Amino acid sequence: MNIFLEITNGIFTGAPIDYNFLLKYIMQRIRKDFRNGNPTRYSLFLGFQLLDFLNQLHLLGNYTGGKYVNSKNLSVLLNGTVPGEKHGYEERTNVIFSEFENFFDTDAKKAVFLEGTLVQYLLNIQKFQRGSTPFRTKLRGLNLDERYVKRIFPEIINKLEEYDANYYKELETLIAKYMIQSGTDWKMSNDEISFYFVLGMNLSNLLKSPKSEVEIEND
């Protein structure tokens, strides 16, 4: 109730609403859905569009990204307007990064987003091969920080190798590149890291391999 009143008050009085304050509550809802085994897509994009709405009203304080994030662009992107199957991961990711260039304004954000995408591919493979997704427990209920995101990156790759299903080496190289370029101090809160990570999970279908896992497996 307090956050609703603060947002409402900000809209009517023109008082800025802190980005980190909002992100904290957005991630609380997303984490609750994740813990309960519910899809996070709905709560994620509600939060995403709330940030954009307040940004359009110039009420989002302490926030420099997201200039190009709006409902129209997001809907177009989610409908699959990405380069064709002949393009590689870098070309497809550049479409998203270019479309939302202020939102993905650091290499750290790009690395976290793409690692979330890679995790979702692993979860899809686990679900396909064994009917369950045990790697979900490694995601700590979406309470992630810089150190942990870096730590589990090789674990994700190792798991894909164990399943003999590592179709994503180009994507892994891209993540490694952004990891290196991002340095050792990302200056991102844990909520922001978790938000970009789950955003990558939910947009993974836009970056999927030109071949499905089944097609590759049967080659």
Image (cartoon, grey):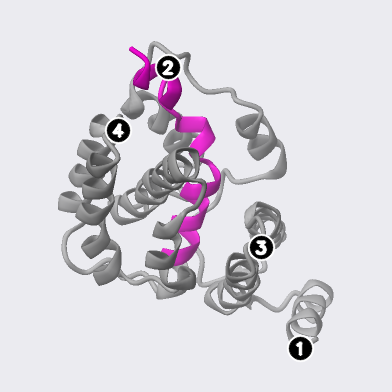
Residue wearing tag 4:
168
Query: Residue 126, how many percent across, how many down?
Result: 43, 45
Is mark 3 in CB contact (under 8 Å) with mark 2? no
Which residue is rendered at x = 42% and y = 72% of the image?
140
Amino acid bearing label 2 = Glu
Seen from the viewer's position, the closer of residues 78 and 9 is 78
How packed is label 2: few (under 14 Cα within 10 Å), some, or many (20 or more)?
few
Comparing marks 2 and 4, which lies closer to the viewer?
Answer: 2
Quarter of the view holding residue 49: bottom right
Q: CA distance from mark 1 to mark 4?
A: 44 Å
Query: Residue 197, how many percent across, how many down?
Result: 44, 57
Of the two numbered discs 2 and 4 on the same chain, state the one appearing first in sequence. Answer: 4
Is mark 1 in CB contact (under 8 Å) with mark 4? no
Amino acid bearing label 3 = His
Is mark 3 in CB contact (under 8 Å) with mark 1? no
> What are the residue bounds of the magenta stretch?
193-219
Residue wearing tag 1:
2
Q: CA distance from mark 1 to mark 2?
A: 50 Å
Seen from the viewer's position, the closer of residues 139 and 215 is 215
Comparing marks 3 and 2, which lies closer to the viewer?
Answer: 2
Amino acid bearing label 1 = Asn
Of the two numbered discs 3 and 4 on the same chain, state the one appearing first in sequence. Answer: 3
Check if residue 201 falls in the magenta segment. Answer: yes
Examine the residues drawn in magenta and state their main secondary structure: helix
Of the two numbered discs 3 and 2 on the same chain, state the one appearing first in sequence. Answer: 3
Residue wearing tag 2:
215
Seen from the viewer's position, the closer of residues 39 and 60 is 39
Query: Residue 80, how many percent across, how many down?
Result: 60, 25
